Amino acid sequence: MRTPGPPSAEVDPLHATWSAALRDDAAAVRALVAALRPVVHARIARALRNNPQAWKRDPREELADLIQEIFLQLFKDDGALLRRWRPDGGMSIRNYVGLIAYRRATSVLARRVGRWQAEPDDGARLDAAAGSVRIDRAVERRDLLRALVATLRAELSAQQFALFTALVLEERDIAELSAAFAMSPNALYTARSRFLSRARKILAQIDEDPTQTAGGS
Amino acid sequence: MTDDDLLAELRALGPDPIDPRLERLVEDPTLLATLQAEAEDDPALARDLALFALLDPAIDAQIAEQIIGRAAPALVEAPAPVEIASPAAVEPPRRRWLVATLAVAAALVLAFFTLRADPARAPATAWTLEALSGEMLHRDDSAPAPVHGPGSTIKLVLRPATPVSAPIKVSAWLAVGDAATRLDDSLVRTEANGASVFSAPVDALPPTPAGPQRLLFVISAPDTLPSARRVPVAELAEGGAWRVVPYAFERRSSP
C-alpha cells in the first residue's frame, strides 16, 4: 500500500481554477463555486447538525444563508482566505475550503448562542435555564476532529482510510493489522506517524485562519 | 500538541453520529432514494437528511454572480434589459445575503447615487456600490467610514439596478480636495450587463496625503468622458453625460 502523503498542486484538479478565480476570472469563479459548493454544503450541514440549539429557522434556510455568507467571506479582501490554501498543506482545495466552512459556520453559530444568552428572548431564556443553550469548547474540539476525520475520509483512498481507522481511531493490534494489510510492523508505525503528521498539518492550516472572529449572522 | 496528544483525542472520538453516506450525498445524488426510504422509519435520519439533501443547483450561480458582481437573474426583480438612455430608475431588491454581508464590518452598501445625469445619454438606472474590503472607522460625529492603508486592496462592486444592454464605460477617479485624477482603466472590469468590479492595491493609487478622500466612478457611454487625466472635481459633476457614484474612504499612511 502506498503510504499517505500530501497531495501535490499538480494533481489537484482545481488548482488552475483556484488560481484563475483569484485573478478575478469570472468563468473560473463560477467553476470554483460550483466545484466547492457541495463540500461547503456538507460541512455546514455537519455544523448545523452538531449545534441544533443555535438555529431556530427552517434548516434549509439556515443552510442556504450560511453557504452564501461563507462563500462571500472566502472571497472577501481579494480572496485572502482562499489564498491561504497551500497545495502542500496536506489537503485538496476542496477539503481545505470544507474545513474552513465548518469552522466558520461553527463560529457563527457559537456567537449566535452567545448573543441569545446575553440578550435572551423568552424562548432562549427558557433554554438557557434548562442548561441546553451552550456550545462547550470540548464539544467544539471533538466536532472539529470529527470534521477532520471526514476530511481525511475524502482525501484518502478507501484502503488508506481503512488503515487510518484501524491504526489511529481504533488502535487495533499491530500484529493483527500486519497480517490484514500485508505490511510490516515498522511500515505500520511509519504510516501511523504520517497519518498523524498530516492531521496536524491540516489542523495547523485551519488554525492559521486569521478571520475567525470576523463575520456573523 | 504532540502526536500522542492528538492520537489520544482521535481515539476518544467514538463513532461519528453522522451517517457517512449523508456527506457523500452532496456529491452522489444516487444515494438519495436509499436514504429517503430508510428515513421513513428513522426520524433521526430524516432530520439529518433535511440538512444534507441536495440544494437547488441555482444557488451556485447566485453565489458566483454575487462574487463577480453580475446580478443573477433570480435576484433581479425587473430582469428585462434597460436601454442606456431609458429614464427609468429602479431600486434594487433587498437581498438577504447582503444583509448577512452587512454584519461583516468590512462590507457595506453605500448608496444609490446620481449626479448631473443627462437624460439623453447617461445610463439611467440606479447603481449600488458595495465595498468588499476595508476596515470600518467609527467617528463620533459621522457615519462609519471605510479605512484603507498600505498593503491593502480596495475592492468594490458597482451594480446597476437593472442590467444595461448598450455599451457603457466605467472610469475610476481619485478625488482629493478639488482635483480628481483618472486611474488606470485596467483597475475596472465591466461586464456586459454593466456590473463592474474595481480592484486596486492602495499602494497602486497615486500618492496622496493620508486622510479623507474619494473614489469617483463615472458611468457613461464610451465616448463621453473627459479626455484629461486630471480635472477639477467640478468638471466631473458638471459633465452632464454621465452618472457619478462616489466611494468616500479614509486613507491611512500605515498598515
Image (cartoon, grey):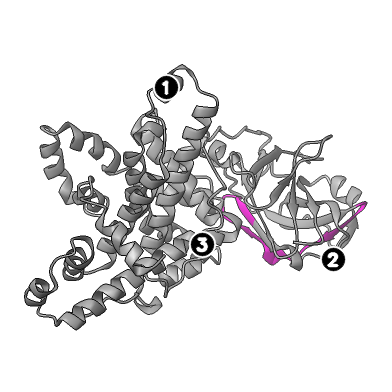
Along the viewing direction, whichever of B175 and B46 lies nearer the viewer: B46
**Image location (x, y in percent) of residue A188:** 19, 77
Residue tagged 1? A129
Residue A101 numbered mark, or none: none
Locate residue B31, reporting x and y percent: 16, 49
Query: Dot 1: few (<14), some (14–19), or many (≥20) neighbours within 10 Å?
Result: few
Residue at 82 percent of width and 65 percent of height: B206
Q: Looking at the picture, which amino acid does disc 3 mark?
A: Glu
Label 2 neighbourhood size at 10 Å, few (<14), some (14-19), many (20+)?
few
Cβ–Cβ under 8 Å for marks 2 and 3:
no
Q: Residue at x 35, y 63 (%)?
A: B5
Viewer-closest of A119 and B80? A119
Q: Picture quarter containing residue B9?
A: bottom left
Per the image, the residue denoted by label 2 is B207
In the structure shown, which secondary structural element does the residue marked by tag 2 occupy?
loop
Residue B1 makes an appearance in the image: yes
Q: Chain of mark 3?
A: A
Residue situated in front as seen by the camera: A98 or B189: A98
Between marks 2 and 3, how big is the CA–CA gap?
Answer: 33 Å
State which quarter of the image contains the N terminus of chain A.
Answer: bottom left
